[in-house]
Image (cartoon, helix red, strand yellow):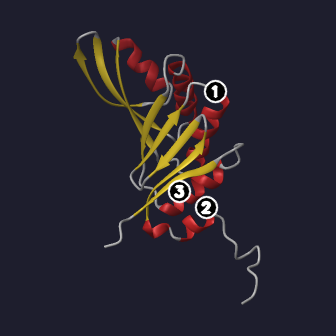
Amino acid sequence: MSEPTDEHMASKNEIYFQEGQNVILVEMGRDDVTVSCTQGKITLWFGRQVSESIIRYVLFGISNVDSSISYELEIVCDFNKISKYESMGYTLISYAKSRGGYRAIFNLPFSKKIALAHFANSIFSQLKERDVRKTLHWSGSFDMVTLVYGELKKLDDWVIKRIEYKAVE
């Protein structure tokens, strides 16, 4: 038997992507940020030490792969602030009068860069108080997860943290 060549010595990451049809979750990231992907959602976790530039890189990197991703945001605010969010690229889904103002539900489309920039700023502001977790909705395949990994692995220390496979029946 011959010695395996570098071409045949696949890393854990390459093996995962070749076996994509058996994967149900891929978690990637580094110490200050984690991106968990399934076929229906992407969960983002940002630790309190992450920089605003890394938050922006992650959000815009994901948007570069799939701009059809969206994030649903619920805000209680004055009626006048609803149009402010719309001017930042958010799409109003519904609103209703509630205690404390108006309860407005927005869709933040990843196709609108101004909305993504505002989203990054709001995440960075929330980090002053606690770690932040956000759930994005998408219909991405594991080929798309491969592209997300390829886009984000440009960050220092970016690795695959965990992979979950479908149970064998």
Q: How many marks?
A: 3
Measured from the top left, where is residue 79 in percent x and y? 34, 13
C-alpha distance separating marks 1 and 2? 27 Å
The secondary element bearing badge 3 is classed as: helix
Could you give the CA–CA distance between mark 2 and mark 3, rounded to whole angstroms? 11 Å
- Mark 3–mark 1 distance (CA, rounded to whole Å): 23 Å
Q: Residues within 10 Å of mark 3 (few under 14, many from 20)?
A: many
Where does the image place residue 156, in percent across and percent down from the top left? 72, 42
Q: What residue type is labelled 2?
A: Asn
Residue type highlighted by circle 1:
Glu
Q: Mark 2 or mark 3: which is in front?
A: 2
Q: Which of 23 and 59 is in front in this view?
A: 23
Quadrant for residue 135, please give it: top left
Q: Are marks 3 and 1 in contact (CB under 8 Å)?
A: no
Which residue is pictured at 29% across the width and 20% down the height? Answer: 103
Question: Quick check: 13 above or below 127?
Answer: below
Disc 1, SS: helix
Q: Residue 145 carries which label?
A: 3
Q: Earlier in the sequence, mark 3 or mark 1?
A: 1
Which residue has dot 1 on it?
A: 52
Earlier along the polypeptide chain: callout 2 or callout 3? 2
Q: Which of marks 1 and 2 is in front?
A: 2
Crowding at dot 2, Cα within 10 Å, few <14 / some 14-19 / many 20+, comes out as some
Taking the spot 54% from the left edge, 19% from the top edge, the residue there is 125
- Give the image location of residue 91, x and y in percent: 40, 32
The residue singled out by tag 2 in the image is 13
User: Can you give x and y, in whole percent of width and height, for residue 121 in the image?
Assistant: 57, 23
Q: Earlier in the sequence, mark 1 or mark 2?
A: 2
Q: What element carries label 2?
A: helix
